[in-house]
Amino acid sequence: MVQSKDNFKEALAFGQDGEREIAKKLITKGYYVLPLYQFQDEISPKIIGDENYISADLICFKNNNTIFIEVKSKNQWVEFAGKIETGCNYKHYQHYRDIALKTKIKTYIVFNHVKGNYQGTYYIDVLKDGRYWDGMAKGKKVYKAEYFWNKNDLINFKEF
């Protein structure tokens, strides 16, 4: 799918709305939240170290603990082999996983499903095993590589 400038702006606004919603929920749970997209919308924030890594959307602080939160706003789930799944870009997943491993800071992906069946907000530790998909279907590249988690492995965000 080719993304036009208008599509990008719509997707960006949709994602930012989801980030704000999750940030507000975290604040009500006692967290202090540092949103990282507040300065330049078109450029992903980076964590710089031995390599450059795409940063999660939010850095959150509570009771002398720091966590990273990546928010993924979604309009649909994926059905694969009879299972319901959700996921994200594999390259981004690798960055979040690597940062979690290198910094020892808990990193979570929060999936904010706003349409369709199973609407709601769910989360998972980025180090929890999932399913890699190479983006191929019937021998053709149809999408970027993705990483998915089974809905049954996700935790309702109300329990966060």
Image: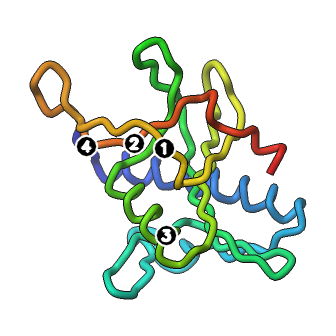
Circle nearer the N terminus (1, 3): 3
Q: Is residue 109 left or right of residue 135?
A: right
Residue that carries the numbered disc 4 in the rendered image: 144
Disc sitting over residue 101 in the figure: 3
Question: Image point 46% across, 39% down: which residue?
Answer: 130
Q: CA distance from mark 3 to mark 2?
A: 17 Å
Residue type at mark 4: give it. Answer: Lys
Measured along the vertical axis of the image, is residue 50 above or below residue 6?
A: below
| Residue 17 percent across, percent down from the top left | 63, 53
Residue at the image position 50 percent from the left and 34 percent from the top? 86
Among the two numbered marks 1 and 4 on one chain, the one whose residue lies closer to the N terminus: 1
Give neighbour class at mark 1: few <14, some 14-19, many 20+ (Cα, 10 Å).
few
Residue at label 2?
Answer: 147
Q: Secondary structure at mark 1?
A: loop
Q: Secondary structure at mark 2?
A: strand
How far apart marks 1 and 4 lie (CA) works out to: 19 Å
Circles 2 and 4: CB atoms closer than 8 Å: no
Nearer the N terminus, badge 3 or badge 4? 3
Estimate how packed mark 3 is, as few (under 14), some (14 to 19) or many (20 or more) residues with alpha carbons within 10 Å.
Answer: some
Determine whether the residue tagged by mark 3 lies in a helix, strand or loop.
helix
Q: Circles 1 and 3: CB distance less than 8 Å?
A: no
> How are the colours assigned in the image?
rainbow
Estimate the x, y position of residue 30 in percent, counting from the top left: 89, 67
For the residue marked with disc 1, what is the amino acid? Asp
For image coordinates 46% across by 61% down, the residue present is 97
Residue marked by disc 1: 129
Q: Picture coordinates of residue 157 (x, y %)? A: 76, 44
